[in-house]
């Protein structure tokens, strides 16, 4: 696959982080282990490492985002990088500037890393293909395609609670069709050897040939939740829906909403995850979202360490490649 | 090659004397990953230190990130005590250029403001590129630039000299 090649160098090291597809067990565990080392930084008096001192990271957001953008920003700042936030949804794109022109202009500001979110699938790969060789590109979500840093923070959170992936049954519930989070997470879980990955959704919210991803499909929440170790709830993405895929939010909640009664079908120590922002009373009940099994806010905290790991690994490989030295 | 245990015994004696001379009753020990931690574990037991052992991985503080990137084997740093006003003993296996110690001092100060920091190393092989000296040294070695001192362990701890190709 072309995407696989462009994010790796000739030795198979990560230069960009565009998609989980095509990565190895080793790539993922290197990120997870590095993130584990970075987690403690937030508990120190000085919540900062000098690693990316003097580097400039540009957050290029062509789509609204609060959590992802702010955690990328915090991650860069905790590595001592300078950060520039550009919300292009409200600027040049509206004035008709092409993606390539935007890219050339920001490159001219001498930056070292682009973090990009874009409504079009493949946009981050396009950037990676055309940027100057010293710049690393991180995909912060492209259309329905991928959201690889979210998948990494999800598996990081799972690993901290339940480290033995082959023994785990994991259910992903809700709007799989529009979810780049689900797609990336399924790839990451398969690479880490998860025991069973289930998707639970109405037919209208499942992509065609979803079984090809190696998942078990359920249409009834009660059947799919039985004995799982991890439940990942997805946000209902109304903004991406065209036409009538859903009867109503109330009806969706009745059939697919996670309530305490339904959570009781899972293993007694199962954890509940959600990439946020949550729609209370649409895909998840407040008692569950705020309950003792919920690790939703832990996911947010972990997102910072995981993004710090990916930033330092990719930029480090750029340096190693450009100076010809081995790590 | 000289026995690492023998050198650690010598370090223990020197450290006890130094701590007495400075009137430091309750120091905390901090080993630098990986070799420094092995030595620190032994010194911790021999000196009977009550504070739990600290471990530093200085990978994110190295001054050569912009040449070689992040060490893929990085481990978490753990300082399970309050660094403020504490007398610390920083421990590493080999003192060479001084760059690792520079990085370790920077990291320590991001945890707090220690009362003092002493440096204890198993081997000082010369070749300093920074104004850094150890307070306690197990052995001094004079080696040509193309030779490296390597500590393997933790059980048994063994020193060897290798020629760098």
Image: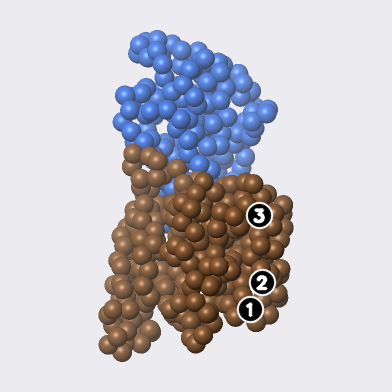
Chain colours: A brown, B blue
Q: Quadrant of the N terminus of chain B?
A: top right
**Spot occupied by residue A46 in the image (x, y as percentages of width and height):** 33, 42
| Circle 3 SS class | loop
User: Could you tell me which chain the residue with mark 3 belongs to?
Assistant: A
Q: Earlier in the sequence, mark 2 or mark 1?
A: 1
Q: Residue at point 56% right, 54% down?
A: A260
Q: Are marks 2 and 1 in contact (CB under 8 Å)?
A: yes
Q: Residues within 10 Å of mark 3 (few under 14, many from 20)?
A: some
Q: Can residue B48 be seen from the camera position used here?
A: yes
Q: Residues within 10 Å of mark 1 (few under 14, many from 20)?
A: some
Q: Chain of mark 1?
A: A
Q: Are marks 2 and 1 on the same chain?
A: yes
- The reply to whether discs 3 and 2 touch (Cβ–Cβ < 8 Å) is no
Per the model, the C-alpha gap separating discs 1 and 3 is: 22 Å
As displayed, is residue A100 above or below residue B93? below
Q: Look at 61% across and 57% down and name the residue there.
A: A262
* Residue A62: % across, % down: 37, 77
Label 2 neighbour load within 10 Å: few <14, some 14-19, many 20+: some
- Label at residue A265: 3
Secondary structure under tag 2 reads loop
């Amino acid at each position: 696959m072309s995407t696989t090649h462009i994010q790796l160098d000739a030795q198979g090291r990560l230069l960009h982080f565009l998609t989980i597809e095509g990565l190895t067990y080793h790539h993922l565990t290197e990120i997870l282990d590095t993130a584990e080392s970075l987690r403690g930084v937030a508990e120190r008096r000085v919540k900062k490492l000098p690693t990316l001192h003097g580097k400039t990271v540009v957050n290029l957001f062509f789509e609204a985002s609060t959590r992802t953008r702010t955690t990328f920003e915090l991650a860069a700042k905790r590595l001592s990088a300078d950060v520039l936030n550009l919300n292009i949804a409200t600027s040049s794109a509206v004035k008709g500037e092409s993606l390539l022109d935007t890219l050339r202009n920001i490159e001219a500001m001498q930056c070292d890393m682009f973090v990009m979110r874009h409504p079009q699938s493949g946009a981050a790969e396009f950037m990676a293909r055309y940027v100057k060789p010293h710049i690393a590109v991180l995909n912060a979500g492209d259309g329905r395609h991928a959201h690889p840093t979210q998948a990494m923070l999800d598996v990081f959170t799972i690993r901290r609670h339940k480290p033995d992936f082959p023994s785990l049954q994991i259910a992903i519930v809700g709007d799989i069709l529009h979810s780049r989070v689900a797609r990336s997470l399924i790839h990451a879980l398969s690479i880490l050897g998860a025991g069973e990955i289930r998707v639970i959704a109405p037919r209208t919210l499942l992509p065609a040939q979803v079984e090809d991803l190696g998942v078990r499909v359920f249409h009834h929440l009660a059947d799919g939740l039985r004995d799982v170790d991890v439940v990942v709830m997805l946000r209902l993405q109304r903004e991406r829906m065209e036409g009538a895929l859903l009867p109503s939010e109330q009806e969706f909640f009745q059939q697919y909403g996670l309530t305490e009664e339904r959570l009781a079908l899972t293993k007694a120590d199962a954890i509940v995850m959600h990439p946020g922002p949550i729609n209370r009373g649409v895909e998840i009940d407040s008692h569950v979202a705020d309950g003792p099994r919920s690790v939703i806010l832990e996911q947010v905290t972990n997102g910072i360490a995981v993004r710090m790991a990916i930033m330092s690994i990719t930029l480090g490989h750029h340096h190693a490649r450009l100076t010809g030295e081995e790590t | 090659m000289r026995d690492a245990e023998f050198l650690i015994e010598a370090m223990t004696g020197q450290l006890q004397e130094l701590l007495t001379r400075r009137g430091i009753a309750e120091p905390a020990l901090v080993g630098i990953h990986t070799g420094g931690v092995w030595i620190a574990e032994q010194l911790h037991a021999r000196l009977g230190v009550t504070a739990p052992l600290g471990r530093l991985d200085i990978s994110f503080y190295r001054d050569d990130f912009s040449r070689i990137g992040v060490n893929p084997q990085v481990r978490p740093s753990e300082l399970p005590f309050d660094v403020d006003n504490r007398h610390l003993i920083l421990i590493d296996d080999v003192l060479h250029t001084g760059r690792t110690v520079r990085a370790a001092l920077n990291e320590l100060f991001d945890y707090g403001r220690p009362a003092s920091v002493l440096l204890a190393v198993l081997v000082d092989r010369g070749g300093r590129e920074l104004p850094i000296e150890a307070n306690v040294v197990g052995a001094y070695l004079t080696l040509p630039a193309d030779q490296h001192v390597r500590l393997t362990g933790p059980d048994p701890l063994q020193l060897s000299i290798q020629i760098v190709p």
